[in-house]
Amino acid sequence: MIGPSLIEHPRVAIHACTAADLAAELAARREGVDLLLADTPYSERTHKGHNGLLPDGRKRIRYKHWTPAQVDAFCDAWLPVTFGWAVSITDHVLAPVWGAAMRRHGRYVFDAPPVPMVVTGSRVRLRGDGPSTWTYQVVLSRPTGFDWRTTRGAYYGPRERLLMTGGKPLWAMRQVVQDYSRPGDVVCDPVCGSGTSLVGALVEGRSALGCDELMVAAGLAEERVAAYLAAGRDELGGPDDDAVEEASRRRDADGA
Ligand SMILES: C[S@@+](CC[C@H](N)C(=O)[O-])C[C@H]1O[C@@H](n2cnc3c(N)ncnc32)[C@H](O)[C@@H]1O
């Protein structure tokens, strides 16, 4: 059983629970989602040596890397309750694991190669053992016979202010939502972090369902979505600022 949504609104629900629990709840209710949009943790290689902190003291949220077995378990739980496209934003190490898991569920998979997601102006860490790639890899799949949409050759746009390490720019989430769902669809991100995908879904006229196993992340998503619903714009995303650039220069200088 999952707890009640952190927000009461006809077009959005956010739960503080694991992805597996939310999928089980939907399966028990014989419900599903139109677009599964998952920006799950990346491989150990990308995470290793990363202190998980945003440089200027914004929300510090620590979460662990994922293993191939976790990707498999996630797909086993979620693909049976996903009626339309499933989109994973991942790294170079786990992209083939996502593709294989989606294929195992009888889906038509677009992963040869995955669609690159390039965030210009972001600084890629080359120390330690990470990262495994300097572009995010977008692995797509749809049920066979569900034959619609074209895709972009790449997702490409500028860095934005982030609320947590590993967060994605709002423009990227909006474009993914535009490409793989229709107005009125239910877009679900079961690893929603600070809720960028949920805001993206709402901006694009979809309904949003999200969860995160960390209360701090689910709470951040709830605050952000509530602010969007109240103001009609995203208060927390938007262009990046000099503080981030300056802090990452400092980190380089310190060898951190
Ligand atoms: C890359 S972050 C998501 C960032 C998000 N897209 C954003 O823009 O803010 C991955 C998130 O997955 C969550 N997570 C990891 N394993 C999970 C699980 N089994 N169930 C639910 N959430 C999980 C972590 O707590 C973390 O917040």
Image: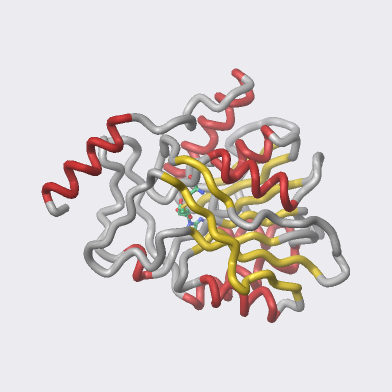
**Residue shown at the point (67%, 32%) measured from the top left:** 203
On screen, residue 79 versus residue 166, left or right, reads: right
Nearer to the camera, 129 or 209: 129
Nearer to the camera, 65 or 216: 65
For the view shown, which residue lies furthest in the left direction?
A: 254
On screen, residue 95 versus residue 44, left or right, reads: right
Q: x%, y% of residue 118?
A: 49, 52
**Residue shown at the point (55%, 27%) measured from the top left:** 234
The answer to which quarter of the image holds residue 79 is: bottom right
Q: x%, y% of residue 13?
A: 66, 40
> As displayed, is residue 244 above or below residue 213?
above
For the view shown, which residue lies furthest in the right direction?
A: 145
**Residue shown at the point (42%, 39%) measured from the top left:** 162
On screen, residue 59 versus residue 91, left or right, reads: left
The quarter in which the N terminus is drawn is: bottom right
**Residue shown at the point (68%, 69%) measured from the top left:** 110
Nearer to the camera, 207 or 244: 244
> As displayed, is residue 232 above or below residue 188?
above
> As displayed, is residue 229 above or below residue 190?
above
The answer to which quarter of the image holds residue 139 is: bottom right
Count of numbered marks: 0
